[in-house]
Image (cartoon, rainbow, N blue to C red):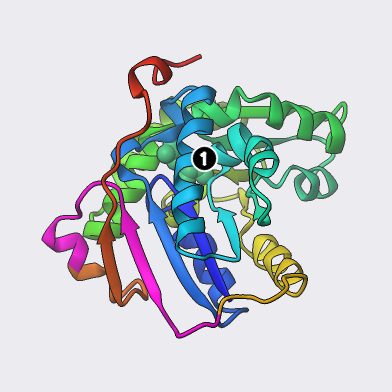
Amino acid sequence: MRIGFIDSGVGGLSILSAVRACIAADYIYVMDNRYLPYGEKSEAFIQSRLTQLSSMLINHQVDLIVIACNTATTQAVASLRQQFSIPFVGTVPAIKPAAALSPEGFAVLATPATCKSAYLEGLIEQFAPGIPVQKVGSSELVLLAEQKVWYGNNVHDAVEQVIRLSSLVDTSPLYIVLGCTHFPFLAAEIKSCLPDAVLLDTADAIARRVTQVVVTIDNPAKANGQQLFISTLELNEQQKGKLAELGFDQYECWSKPAEDYSSLSSPS
Ligand code: DGL
């Protein structure tokens, strides 16, 4: 079994560790750091780029692709499922569990693109009809999670500033859905600003879903323990030094730019 993962940065590693804990397989993790943050890109750009990255992973003979990114899933998973025959497991904000836990309302902390997506609106209409949902979008938190994971930077004060400037401090919601895979890496900092909040993420639910899907795959690739990390911009030495700690034994840079980036990059 060979499983591919895609995210713009380190966020998908929060999903990868939950999946790895359940399934022994070859893993190929693609970090599209060339275009981080996805939360500031248009839907057309994300669809086109995810098509390109999925093709690359399919050339690496993956059996299944986990879109370990809420932004990419909300903008592109439907189009990927139309184009390719291999299964895609997407990552979407935990609206259904939040609605069950807190019918009086909750918040979703996600990227700006996820917050304004029709997909998120559809999830709210389907699973939380009539429930007040406060959407808070931030790309700053994405970049702070990158700094924390790669360099071990203390980002507490910067996270606190983002939270203080957001509407979350006024409403102090009891339940906050972490609708971006980068944000579980900032859970301690977010909790220290909002100590009463319960943070909901999707890593375990995705791992359960991947476990269900893998058993349906005929003739999976023969695993040899490969743990490959691919970035789309060359990692610096400090980042490369961190890869073993993150569970990777191979590294490649795949530097192909997005196709026709100029016409696709402006926010919709
Ligand atoms: N990790 C991604 C998500 O779950 C997106 C971060 C970005 O904006 O690039 O939405």
Q: Is residue 31 above or below residue 205?
A: above
Find residue 129 and report its image quarter: top right
Residue 268 image offset from top left, x and y in percent: 51, 14
Q: Is residue 147 above or below residue 216?
A: above
Nearer-the-camera pick, 228 or 219? 219
Q: Is residue 195 left or right of residue 74?
A: left
Tell me, yes or no, if residue 242 can be seen here: yes
Q: Is residue 82 above or below residue 262?
A: below
Nearer-the-camera pick, 197 or 63? 63
In reply to whether residue 252 is colored magenta, the answer given is: no
Q: Is residue 234 left or right of residue 118?
A: left
In reply to whether residue 236 is colored magenta, the answer given is: yes
Range drawn in magenta? 222-240
Q: Is residue 170 left or right of residue 157?
A: right
Residue 77 image offset from top left, x and y in percent: 64, 40
* Residue occupying image coordinates x 54% and y 61%: 15
| Residue at numbered disc 1 | 51
Residue 227 image offset from top left, x and y in percent: 39, 75
